[in-house]
Amino acid sequence: MYSKEIKKIIKEYEFLFWYTPDKEKQNISLDLLVETILNYGDLEAVRKLIAVLGIKQTANIFSNAKKRKKLNYYPEIHNYFSLYFKKYA
């Protein structure tokens, strides 16, 4: 179960998850949440995500995506957040 803060972020930015059925939006994985917010969210969404998850957990989720066969981050987003998390996490 997710905390109220995570559910609030999902609800606030549910338009980013347009392809997910409404009844399943509150059950998306943290991997998908981080990936979608970093790829498509605005700066405020990224700030809220990091405030709720913490920079270390967000960085861990981001870095674990490299282990997947297909990386779903845009190259420029991946480069930016790789540098960002290397410096601040």
Image: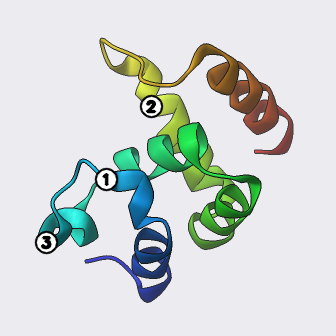
Mark 3 belongs to which amino acid? Lys
- The quarter of the rendered structure image containing the N terminus is bottom left
Looking at the image, which is closer to me, 60 or 70? Answer: 70
**Tag 2 residue:** 64
Looking at the image, which is closer to me, 30 or 87? Answer: 30
- Marks 2 and 3, the one that precedes in the sequence: 3
Judge left or right: residue 72 versus residue 40.
Answer: left
Mark 2 belongs to which amino acid? Asn
Q: Residue at x 61, y 14 (%)?
A: 75
- Marks 3 and 1, the one that precedes in the sequence: 1
Q: How far apart are marks 2 and 3 (CA)?
A: 27 Å
Helix, strand or loop status at disc 2:
helix
Looking at the image, which is closer to me, 24 or 85? Answer: 24
Seen in the picture, residue 41 relative to 7 is either above or below; the reply is above
Q: Position of residue 57 (x, y in %)?
A: 56, 54
- Based on the displayed image, in which of its 4 quarters is residue 89 positioned? top right
**Tag 3 residue:** 23
Helix, strand or loop status at disc 3:
helix
Tell me whether circle 2 and circle 3 mark residues in contact (CB < 8 Å): no
Q: Which residue is drawn at 38% across and 19% down?
A: 67
Mark 1 belongs to which amino acid? Trp
Task: Report crowding for label 3: few under 14, some 14 to 19, many 20 or more residues within 10 A (C-alpha).
Answer: few
Judge left or right: residue 17 versus residue 47.
Answer: left
Q: Residue at x 71, y 19 (%)?
A: 79
**Tag 1 residue:** 18
